Amino acid sequence: MKVLYTRISTIDQKSDRQTQNSKDYDMLLEDTSSGATPFFEREKGKLIEKMVNKGQVTSLFVHQIDRLGRNLMDILKTIEYFNKKGICVHFIQQGIKTLNEDGTENQISKMIISILGVVAEMERNLIKERQLEGIAIAKANGVYKGRKRGTSSSTLDFINKPKNKKAVERLELGVKKSEVAKITGLHINTITKISKALAKLNST
């Protein structure tokens, strides 16, 4: 099965650029996750791993390397995993693939991926630095106050997180907390926090 994998960082982002010609693939899987989150800790990353273990994946297609991750070590570990399984990873925009036709590792691609992986990691660190600088300037100017704990907006932000929203849906259907934890993969303590947040919103 040819799987096209896409990743966006927030639900506000669009993946149109990554999903062009998606009909050419057998399955499209999209994660909403930070690039810093290890691939196999993401929802669709976990699903792909299960599919690989069942022998359902023959090749993985990703628009560009930073969609796989923005941490060089995780990118290389992820690629190594697929290589050992004999699954070629294709990076569409860069036009490179991790395995040769005979199944051996593509050394030139490995070198290019390492370089681009470093660039992706540096870019992520630069973004973080700019964010911190922006917050520091805003605080100095008295503009940034931070988020007050316990406000309804912060509660809404919390329950509207992609994974938490799935838990909310099931809790509202009356599913037990322990079962919701198993279904969503969230810790039972997180489910309890979500349940309390819901009760708080419903009481206002």
Image (cartoon, rainbow, N blue to C red):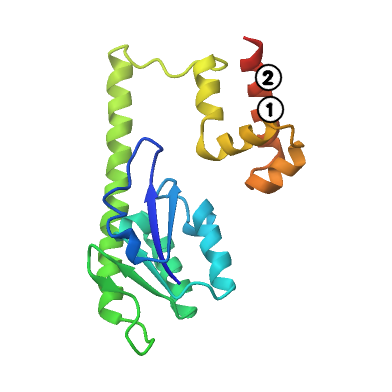
Quarter occupied by the C terminus = top right
Q: Amino acid at mark 1?
A: Ser
Question: Which numbered circle lies on residue 199?
Answer: 2
Few, some or many C-alpha atoms within 10 Å of disc 1 (few <14, some 14-19, many ≥20)?
some
Question: Which numbered circle lies on residue 95?
Answer: none
Residue at (22, 65) in percent of width and height:
94
Q: Judge left or right: residue 180 versus residue 107.
A: right
Pick whichever, 122 or 86, lies toward us.
86
Of helix, strand and loop, which one carries label 1?
helix
**Hey, which quadrant is residue 134 in on the image?**
top left
Residue 130's spot in the image, x, y percent? 27, 35
Can see residue 71? no
Residue 179's spot in the image, x, y percent? 74, 43
Q: How many callouts does the rendering have? A: 2
Label 2 with label 1: CB-CB less than 8 Å: yes
Q: Is residue 202 above or below residue 79?
A: above
The residues bearing labels 2 and 1 have C-alpha atoms spaced at a distance of: 6 Å
Farthest left residue in view: 94
Pick whichever, 142 or 88, lies toward us.
88
**Hey, which quadrant is residue 119 in on the image?**
bottom left
Of helix, strand and loop, which one carries label 2?
helix
Pick whichever, 143 or 14, lies toward us.
14
Q: Judge left or right: residue 147 versus residue 113.
A: right
Q: Which residue is mark 1?
A: 195
Residue 95's spot in the image, x, y percent? 23, 69
Can see residue 15? yes
Q: Is residue 135 above or below residue 117?
A: above
Residue at (59, 73) in percent of width and height:
54
Q: Is residue 121 above or below residue 78?
A: above
